Image (spheres, rainbow, N blue to C red):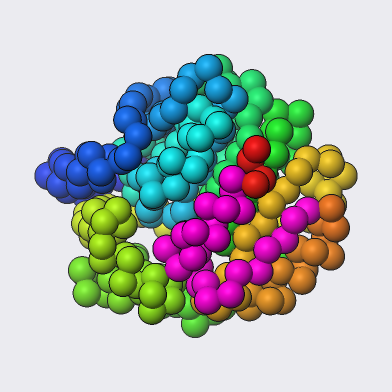
Amino acid sequence: MAGISAFRSDDARTAYCELYDAAIATSPIPVTESDVETSFGRTHVLTAGDPSKAPLVAIHPLALSSTSWLPLLPTLAARHHVTMIDAVGDVNKSVASRPLTTAAHVVTWLDETLRALEIEGAAIVAMSMGTWMTTQYTMTFPDRVERLALIAPVGLVSGQHLRWMAHGAYANYLRPTKARLESFIDTTATPAGRQRLRQDPWQPIIQQYVTGTIGFNKALVAARPTRCNLQRLASTQIPVLVIVGREESLHNGPKMAARFRQQLPAARIELVNDANHLIPTDQPEIVEKLLTDFLQ
């Protein structure tokens, strides 16, 4: 099991799962939990909405799990049956049997998961680390993606700020404590967003992140978001929405938006004012409106 991300103990996993369940209990729409087996381990899945509606797949940010979609669930489920997938190897209810170390691994794992769920084609919504994962998948299987929404993309067209990466490594991997993790997550939101992180529905999600990260042993070797050649994505003619915060702490927001416009000239690129990396907490109404317009 060396090199495989996992909780440090059964007690740590139990404490995390209790908070995960508490977050689900706040959902405004009933959520169903299930698991599917892949060659990379057991993948945990949340589903919500009318099964007769068109499928939509949602991939979460690093360390926040699928419960991070719950605040947006009424928007996502308005016209879709929503499937939220916990990435193996990350802090969530999935259980890895081998690590995702390359982009090819990510694509294989996600393809196996969707096939096990009998999802042959779907719209995809992703945030942060999830945007890199789903973009890799979309460029490999363009015929299986109907449209792609990328919220606060990471990597893809620009590298992350080194100082922010060092802060994240120290808080999340080297010396995770409640105070450090709360301070770190604050760096991804505006002052208004930080207040929302301490209120429902975000409060139990952040508590879950803090407790989970402290009790989780993250493998040193894992897939990391890197710049991509988006020419393949541009050539697919798949509708793409990219939402970037102007005050983005991981990247230079305006420069990143400009690069997306250059590389994906047919895509809709939105640079949101008064928004950092956690755009749904900073500008929830704007994100909901953009997703509603795009998904319908």
- The image quadrant that residue 145 belongs to is top right
- The image quadrant that residue 104 belongs to is top right
- Is residue 12 rendered magenta in the image? no
Q: Of all residues shown, which one is farthest toward the left?
A: 11
- Residues 60 and 96: in front is 60
* Residue at 32% across, 40% down: 28
- Residues 240 and 113: in front is 240
| Percent x, y of residue 171 | 33, 72
Is residue 146 placed above or below 197 in the rendered structure? above
Q: Is residue 188 toward the left or the right of residue 204 in the image?
A: right
- Residues 128 and 288: in front is 288
- Is residue 273 rendered magenta in the image? yes
In which quadrant is the N terminus drawn?
A: top left
Q: Is residue 209 visible?
A: no
| Percent x, y of residue 287 | 54, 57
| Percent x, y of residue 228 | 73, 57
Q: Is residue 242 visible?
A: yes
Q: Is residue 286 toward the left or the right of residue 28 in the image?
A: right
Is residue 172 placed above or below 92 in the rendered structure? below
How many discs appear? 0
Which stretch appears magenta? Answer: 267-292
* Residue at 42% across, 23% down: 36
In which quadrant is the C terminus drawn?
A: top right
Q: Is residue 161 toward the left or the right of residue 175 in the image?
A: right
* Residue at 71% across, 69% down: 257
* Residue at 15% across, 46% down: 15
- The image quadrant that residue 31 belongs to is top left
| Percent x, y of residue 165 | 48, 74
